[in-house]
Amino acid sequence: MIYWDVSPNIISIGPITIRWYGLLFATAFLVGFQIMTKIFKHEKKNLNDLNDLVWYMILGTVIGARLGHCLFYNPSYYLSNPVEILKIWHGGLASHGAAIGILLAIYLYSKKKKDQPFLWAMDRIVITVALGGFFIRTGNLFNSEIIGKPANVPWSFVFVRAHVPDPLTPRHPAQLYEALAYLTIFFILNHLYKKYDGKFNNGYLFSIFLILVFGFRFFVEFFKEVQEPWEAALPLDMGQLLSIPLIILGVYLYYKSKPTKIKGKHNDT
């Protein structure tokens, strides 16, 4: 087993502390920007649009993730104390909330960019989102959060700094499972984009992203501790319940956009 006693802080200078999570979160956007720059150049899109796209993505991700955590996992507390919603530095971001936030943000973005329909934009953005998921879950590992259930496997982690009653109990490194899964999905999506040279029906890569990411998220929840005690009484936890509609949407989009329907050009859905 692995004793994980890594500090979440990289360095502290006076009142300023640089944390691994913040660094990896920022890295996700920086690397994503570079990938989207290459895609825009390849498809001869206006590079100035990327500045708008980045801000839509940042706001959609952060606002969606924060509201998702507050409303999905502890709505009674945050609705009674709405000011606490703004205290994002106290922690609490939900990936399903981020997914909804990104969907809404890109919808608003695409309404202003007539040459970049919603599904066209999502097909390209999910490549960067999958890689971003890898960086963010790695950040969760450094924070010793989103830990797994007790396990008796050779790769078990003992999360010494975890805020649980029994921090010395070996557990599944659930964050690492997700990080590696999202990195694999990134390579799959990037390969498919290059294979078809960006010429596929709109919604194709987005559908595969939804099926793979949230299909794995549904599966990995069986190895994770619940985020809130009340979830233990549910047949499926909140992460699984929120994943189901996104998987169904992915299957629907896949059968609408699968490559067999391509006839020399892609559909501008």
Image (cartoon, helix red, strand yellow):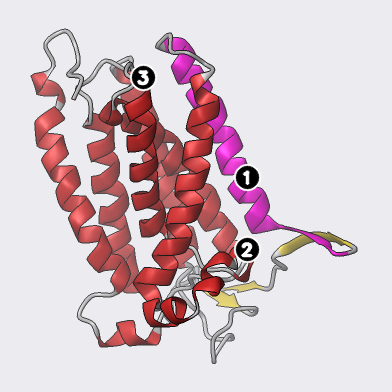
**Residue pointed to by mark 1:** 26
Instruction: Report the residue at 70% width, 68% height from top.
Output: 6
Alpha carbon distance from label 1 to label 2 = 15 Å
Instruction: Report the residue at 48% width, 62% height from top.
Output: 66
Of label 2 and label 3, which has the lower sequence position?
2
Q: Whole-percent x and y of residue 253?
A: 15, 37
**Residue pointed to by mark 2:** 142
Q: Whole-percent x and y of residue 169?
A: 53, 85
The residue positioned farthest toward the bottom in the image shown = 165
Does the magenta run of residues contain 38?
Answer: yes
Alpha carbon distance from label 3 to label 1 = 26 Å
Q: Whole-percent x and y of residue 100?
A: 34, 51
Residue 28 falls left or right of residue 232: right
Query: Disc 2 marks which amino acid?
Result: Phe
Q: How many marks?
A: 3
Residue 121 versus residue 143 in the image, above or below: above
Residue 136 versus residue 206 in the image, above or below: below
The residue positioned farthest toward the right in the image shown = 14
- Does dot 2 land on a helix, a strand or a loop? helix
Query: Disc 3 marks which amino acid?
Result: Lys
**Residue pointed to by mark 3:** 194
Residue 173 versus residue 100 in the image, above or below: below
Residue 194 falls left or right of residue 65: left
Contact check, label 1 and label 2, Cβ < 8 Å: no
